[in-house]
Image (cartoon, rainbow, N blue to C red):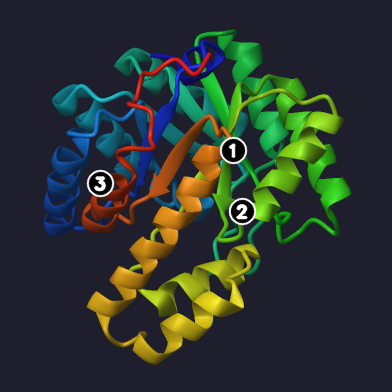
Amino acid sequence: MKIGDLLKRGIFSVSFEFFPPKTEEGEKQLFETIEELKTLKPTFVSVTYGAGGSTRDRTRNVVRKIHEQTGLNVMAHLTCIAHSRKELVEILEDYRRMGIENILALRGDVPRDRPDFRPPEGACTYARELVELIRERFGSYFSIGVASYPEGHPESPNLEWEIRFFKEKVEAGADFSITQMFFENRYYYDFVERCQRAGLKVPIIPGIMPITNFKQIRKFAAMCGATVPQHLIEKMEPVEDKPEEVTKIGVEFAVRQCEDLLRNGVPGLHFYTLNRSRATLQIYSALKDHVPPSGTHLR
């Protein structure tokens, strides 16, 4: 099922993001998580792609296994900065043969362990170019999602630039967007309003990161430029070495965040699970009277 088509029909989306594990034990944990979250009937699930294409084979294998063994609708992340266009087309051809219809098109990060890294000659160096390549070579076969950054990408000097680059991705053929994690909804609302003023009508799904490890989340937030509210920091810091307390506060915070987003008519919720189900299940359980069942028509 093409995610873009579902969203165009006004169907509310619930989705979960996973990363390809490095070990057999990690894969076992991931598929236990998938079985637990499958009960929520997600619209789709997605699988990330490592910096510099470092998880190419692992991402492919997890995507295939989820697709073939669970019946879930899978979106494969694909980054372009470390691949030639020929390699990108080969990866996409492989996904088409599998029956995968959804791609999240990303530029990707430069590998941190390769300070002398240079993209291959003629590579797609921006997500926009990857979207263009997919449309040029595969037409409408794939539904294409792209990332959006409510507080601005770390490399963007301001939000005007951010909207400009986002608009280029949409005009190149993106069907929808999933945001980087954020913890203050005002950034999401402001970003959506700016997009609407720029004439952009694609669905922008908010990305929700349940906090279960505060030290880890602060690190993630610093890397991507997401603001952690001071009142949340003050609650978390005294208990940051107590996982149960951190999870309790994190779940309560995410529930309130999602309730506000739902009241304001978001097209869906995308949960960054970190390959664990507990916090997401707790959040969803608390929201069950507010979340339209996945597949519900909003209009």
Amino acid tagged 1: Asn
Residue 41: percent from left, percent from top: 25, 28
Q: Nearer the viewer, residue 199 or 12?
A: 12
Q: Which residue carries the number 1 mark?
A: 264
Tell me the SS state at disc 3: helix
Tell me the SS state at disc 2: helix
Horizontal placement of 16 versus 28: left or right? Answer: right
CB within 8 Å, label 1 to label 2: yes
Q: Residue at x 72, y 38 (%)?
A: 192
Residue 56: percent from left, percent from top: 39, 42
Q: Which residue carries the number 2 mark?
A: 185
Label ID, residue 285: 3
* Residue 51 against residue 124 in the figure, above or below: below
Horizontal placement of 82 versus 65: left or right? Answer: right
Mark 3 or mark 2, earlier in chain: 2
Question: Marks 1/3: CA distance?
Answer: 20 Å
Amino acid tagged 3: Ser
Question: Marks 3/2: CA distance?
Answer: 21 Å
Q: Residue at x 60, y 79 (%)?
A: 230
Camera-near label (1 vs 2) is: 1
Mark 1 or mark 2, earlier in chain: 2
Q: Residue at x 50, y 37 (%)?
A: 78
Residue 76: percent from left, percent from top: 41, 33
Q: Is residue 79 something that shows in the picture?
A: no
Q: Residue at x 44, y 24 (%)?
A: 12
Q: Residue furthest bottom?
A: 238
Amino acid tagged 2: Asn
Horizontal placement of 34 versus 152: left or right? Answer: left
Q: Nearer the viewer, residue 224 or 150?
A: 150
